[in-house]
Image: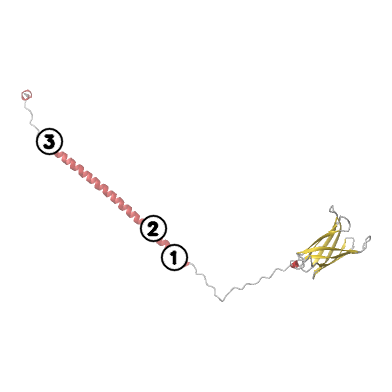
Amino acid sequence: MPEAEGGALPAPDIGRPWLSGDWAKWLTAAVLLFVVAGGYWAFSQNHRAKLEQARALAETKRQMSEGEAKAGARQRAAERAEPVPKRTEPGVQAAAVPTEPPRPLANAPSAAGAAPDGLYAGPICYGPAARDPPRCFRAQATISRGRIAGQWPGRDPGVTMFMAGEVSASGEAKIRMHAEKPDGTRTVAVDLAGTLKDGRLDATGSFRNGRTATLNWRKSATGSR
């Protein structure tokens, strides 16, 4: 028997199972309370964050509205400050002063020479020379914008006579003639001066050796422009 070997047995612990079950209940209640408290704290924090965000958004909108209102007020003030253009009286008008046309130079090529422009032709006469009697021949040249230009065959074979000159606005004419060989050599030269008036070109001059030369041309109807 066990009692005989070891002595008296200890009395059974009747209260331990009750204490263990009560402790478990309190532990469960504590855990539940902790979970509820934690959930409430998380909910409150989330709610507070949302409130802060809503307040910040409302403040931003308010500032934007105030900024737009101020900008509009400044624009309206600037528009009111702009000067109103003055209306001109219907009876007062500026009178345009006519400008005086430029006057042509006396020695410049005639701009009004467009009227006498055309072909001029007639005799050229040379006075007596030591080995050449007086003689006349017919030639022609054109006048365009106050410039004289012409050429014709000379008396000697292969020689060409050239004429160049100008007519001023007052009708004064200056003419130079020279003979030119095929190789470009100039043999004779004549300087003449005269007038262009009423369709007539009259000029007189001389060679370098003193021989006289005269020119009496009229404007050609067939060559006029």
Disc 1: CA contacts within 10 A as few (<14), some (14-19) or many (>=20): few
- Amino acid bearing label 3: Pro
In-front residue for pair 144/88: 144
Disc 3 versus disc 2: distance between alpha carbons?
71 Å
Mark 3 or mark 2, earlier in chain? 3
* Left or right position of 198 against 131: left
Disc 1 versus disc 2: distance between alpha carbons?
18 Å
Please state the horizontal and vertical placement of residue 126, each as a whole percent of the image: 89, 63
Mark 1 or mark 3, earlier in chain? 3
Q: Residues at badges 3 and 2 in contact (C-beta under 8 Å)? A: no
Please state the horizontal and vertical placement of residue 149, each as a whole percent of the image: 80, 61
Q: Quadrant of the C terminus?
A: bottom right
Element assignment for label 2? helix
Name the residue: 42% across, 61% down: 71
Please state the horizontal and vertical placement of residue 31, each as a whole percent of the image: 20, 42
Instruction: State which quadrant residue 124 falls in.
Output: bottom right
Residue to which mark 1 is pinned: 76
Per the rendering, the mark at residue 17 is 3
Element assignment for label 3? helix
Residue to which mark 2 is pinned: 64
